[in-house]
Amino acid sequence: MTTDMRHADFDIMPDADSVARKMAGIFVGTVDAHPDRPVRIALSGGSTPKRLFEILASADMKDRVDWSRVELFYGDERHLPAGHKDRNHTMAEAVLLSKLPVAADQVHAVPASGTVMEDARAYEQVLQKAYGSTRLEKDRPLFDLVMLGMGGDGHTASLFPGQPVLEETQKWVSVAQPRTAPYERITLTYPAIASSALVVFLITGESKTEMLGRLRAGDKTIPAGRITSEGKILVLADQAAAGS
Ligand code: 6PG
């Protein structure tokens, strides 16, 4: 059963901190739900996840997760040299990953040593190796959980308005040259994100009000509005973004 945004659940919460805390609980629950196997989670980028990462790294939350079974990926990445301050992995490493009992091979940063296309292909191969196949199977999701943000132009991951990647139906990873944000990007495609048991959007702040309204209306003219999942979609937003 494919879920689209018209059938997504929306949970409007008092503030950004409560959004992050709710997401942390979902993260823990996702890992707990599969005690017999590794769990694949795609982290979102941008600034919104920082509070979530701080909560997951905190003493009381960190010990609630069996990190030995967690495999972490990224929904997208800025195509910058490893360690660059504006890479999503740089913030995640500083705030969360460096504080966790995870081995290096459990965290899959997007490659950054080649051209943007070379690194996109390399990242797709990382995903296919983790999944164990080059073909996505309907009843076996690539991700147990995909976290997404949304920009003020309605983009999500690095699926930006007007970009050819929006029409990609086969590849799992592709590239974008956004006009409304800096840097070339490497991003999961719609088919890769759809291969998920659960997609959770984290949307906070009044700058997202217009686009959250369009997302809730099922507007498919914005990239975030075209997200689907083989499982469920949940939008966690604060009252500032909801305009309430
Ligand atoms: C990125 C993202 C992007 C982000 C949104 C929201 O690399 O920038 O993955 O999709 O999630 O732009 O960004 P903020 O959380 O900073 O508002």
Image (tube, grey):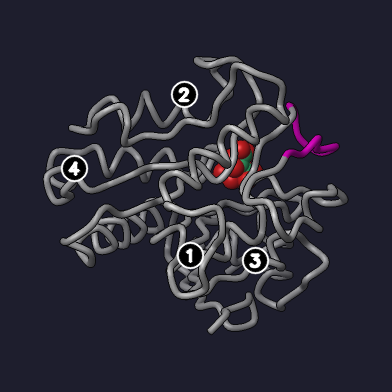
Secondary structure character of the magenta stretch overall = loop
The quadrant where residue 77 appears: top right
Nearer to me, 233 or 194: 194
Q: Secondary structure at mark 1?
A: loop
Q: Is residue 116 above or below residue 242?
A: above
Where is mark 3, residue-wise?
Answer: 227
Which residue in the protein does label 2 denote? 90
In contact (CB < 8 Å): disc 2 and disc 1 = no
The residue under label 4 is which amino acid type?
Ser
Q: CA distance from mark 1 to mark 3?
A: 11 Å
In percent of width and height, residue 50 lies at: 42, 38
**Disc ID at residue 68:** 4
Crowd tier of the residue under label 2, counting other residues whose Cα lies within 10 Å: few below 14, some 14–19, many 20 or above: some
Residue at 42%, 63% (x, y): give it.
14
Badge 1 is on which residue? 196
Disc 1 residue type (three-letter): Ser
Secondary structure beneath dot 2 equals helix
The answer to whether residue 2 is above or below residue 223 is: below
Q: Tell which tag, 4 or 3, sits nearer the viewer.
A: 4
Mark 4 vs mark 3: which is more N-terminal? 4
**N-term-proximal mark, 2 vs 1:** 2
Using residue 3 as the reference point, say whether residue 60 is left or right of it.
left
* Amino acid at pointer 3: Ile
Distance CA(mark 2)–CA(mark 1): 25 Å
What's the magenta region?
175-183
